[in-house]
Image (cartoon, grey):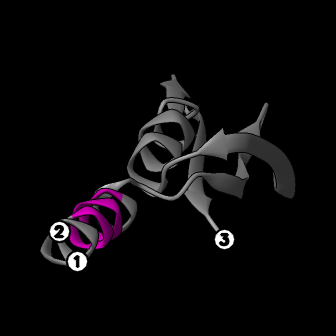
Amino acid sequence: MKKMILAVAVIGCVTVLTSCKKDYVCTCSGTVLGIPYSGADTTLVDMSKKDAETKCSSFDWTVGTDSQTCELK
């Protein structure tokens, strides 16, 4: 019985500590040639929240007066 409880506890800990992967939506807005835009969405598939935030922020850019900023919805 003690081995069974230990096995369940170990499996429970592994399950809790494993990061959940799911789909996230990264939405971007900015200006190109002085024309504003918004709602440019990209779906980030099967990622942890931390990885999705990193990927989404990698879409940010600035060139001269044009720029784009992105964030997770």
Label 3 – label 1 distance at C-alpha: 40 Å
Label 3 – label 2 distance at C-alpha: 40 Å
Magenta segment:
7-14
Mark closer to the chain start, 3 or 2: 2
SS assignment at label 1: helix
Quadrant of the rendered image containing residue 72: bottom right
Residue picked out by circle 1: 5
Question: At label 2, which amino acid type do we have?
Answer: Leu
* Image quadrant where one finds the C terminus: bottom right
Depth check, front residue: 65 or 15: 15
| Image-based side of 8 in relation to 53, left or right | left
| Image-based side of 58 in relation to 32, left or right | left
Badge number at residue 17: none
| Image-based side of 47 in relation to 12, left or right | right
Task: Tell me, yes or no, whether the two marked residues, 3 and 2, touch with CB atoms within 8 Å.
Answer: no
Residue picked out by circle 3: 73
Badge number at residue 6: 2
Q: Residue at x 49, y 30 (%)?
A: 58
Task: Tell me, yes or no, whether the two marked residues, 3 and 1, touch with CB atoms within 8 Å.
Answer: no
Task: Tell me, yes or no, whether the two marked residues, 2 and 1, touch with CB atoms within 8 Å.
Answer: yes
Mark 3, residues whose alpha carbon is within 10 Å: few (<14), some, or many (≥20)? few
Label 2 – label 1 distance at C-alpha: 4 Å
Mark 2, residues whose alpha carbon is within 10 Å: few (<14), some, or many (≥20)? few
Q: Is residue 58 above or below residue 52?
A: above
Question: At label 1, which amino acid type do we have?
Answer: Ile
Q: Is residue 37 above or below residue 6?
A: above
Residue 43 place in picture, x, y as percent? 81, 46
